[in-house]
Image (tube, rainbow, N blue to C red):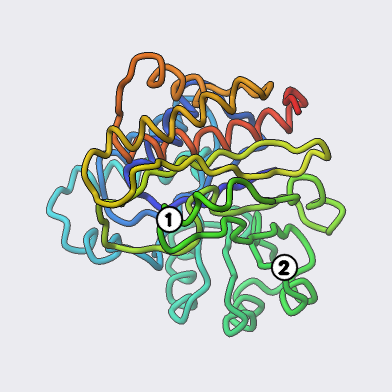
Amino acid sequence: MYLPYLRGRQYELLALRELAENNLINNKILPIIEPIKPSATLLKTMGMFINKEKDLAVILHPQVGNFNKDISILKKEGWKMNFSEALKSKNIVISHIMNENSNNELNELFSNGVEENELLVINKNKDYLSNYLESFGNKNPLYTLIPEESAFKRKIKVKRVLLEDRFEKEARNADYKDINSRAFSEDHIYFEEDGFMGYSDYSIVGEEYSESGFAPYAVAIHIVYFDTDKSLRIKHFVSNSNKDINDPAGKFGEALQKLAEWKETRNINTYSLEKFMEHYRNGTYPGLGTVKKLAIMHHIELISQYFDGKFDL
């Protein structure tokens, strides 16, 4: 199974919501949200998964963003109530990241009726391995996400999921122009052989999280595709006129034309690629957030197709 790990940015939440709404993911896809702020979009995304009876993991006490602070001072009691109700759904998987305050946070979850075997746990830091073992003992969480390191694999042997960042992030979008394409991941092929129940990554966004946003000099569209050996590669379609931040719509058009020309040579079909082609045919620019949303959706839908055996090389 595949557990795409996304932060709760607007375009990430919309990507997941649209995938669920259009029935583009199967039950072998379990998305994980680490929310960065309490928002209506987060509630609507959770609601969509609940209505579609699809599982969605939501991290409580996230380690990035302002969710913990914002929810503590939130005056919208209705939001808090709706969030709490959504968390009770059988389709929402309560999730936790091991951290220095895990003992208190886990005890709070357990006291509120969350069972150990219902919990998804993310354990990326060796400093918290002993805390993990003390907290769970012989009661295994539903899944435990760990990196591909011996220290973790020796101590966490069951119900483990591989978590690695497979997106090689460049300092600037323009830097992708010289790369063209490169290897992305083989985890979907080998995770079971390597002793994992599933695998997880940060899709085409990467693990690094930044609060600040800025207008890019270049527009880059990151598209994953299957190579002939079924491994995933990633291709970067980058604009040409990258000397300043002016005309993002024009830059998008340049990158999109390259994507359209490439797609003509590939037998690859997803909902999101068709949306990109609609923008190409209509000459429209949906905004950079939607560009990222569609690229994420394409990746996750493609993996769902892989597990269904419906993908084309």
Q: Point out the tag, 1 or 2, that comes first from the N-terminus.
A: 1
Q: What residue is disc 2 on?
A: 148
- Res 152 → quadrant: bottom right
Residue occupying image coordinates x 54% and y 52%: 178
Query: Which amino acid type corresponds to the residue marked 1 in the rendered image?
Result: Glu
Mark 1 or mark 2, whichever is nearer to me? 2
Report the number of discs: 2
Against 30, residue 311 (above or below) is above
Give how far across and how far down residue 130 sits, in percent. 64, 83
Residue occupying image coordinates x 59% and y 60%: 165
Residue 119, visible in the rendered structure: no
Residue lying farthest to the right in this orientation:
193
Residue occupying image coordinates x 43% and y 35%: 255
Per the rendering, the mark at residue 100 is: none
Residues under numbered marks 1 and 2 in contact, where contact means CB atoms less than 8 Å apart: no
Q: CA distance from mark 1 to mark 2?
A: 21 Å
Give how far across and how far down residue 296 sits, in percent. 49, 39
Give how far across and how far down residue 70 sits, in percent. 22, 61
**Are there few (<14), some (14-19), or many (20+) residues within 10 Å of tag 1?**
many
Against 147, residue 309 (above or below) is above
Query: Which amino acid type corresponds to the residue marked 2 in the rendered image?
Result: Glu
Left or right of residue 5, residue 210 in this image: left
Per the rendering, the mark at residue 34 is: 1
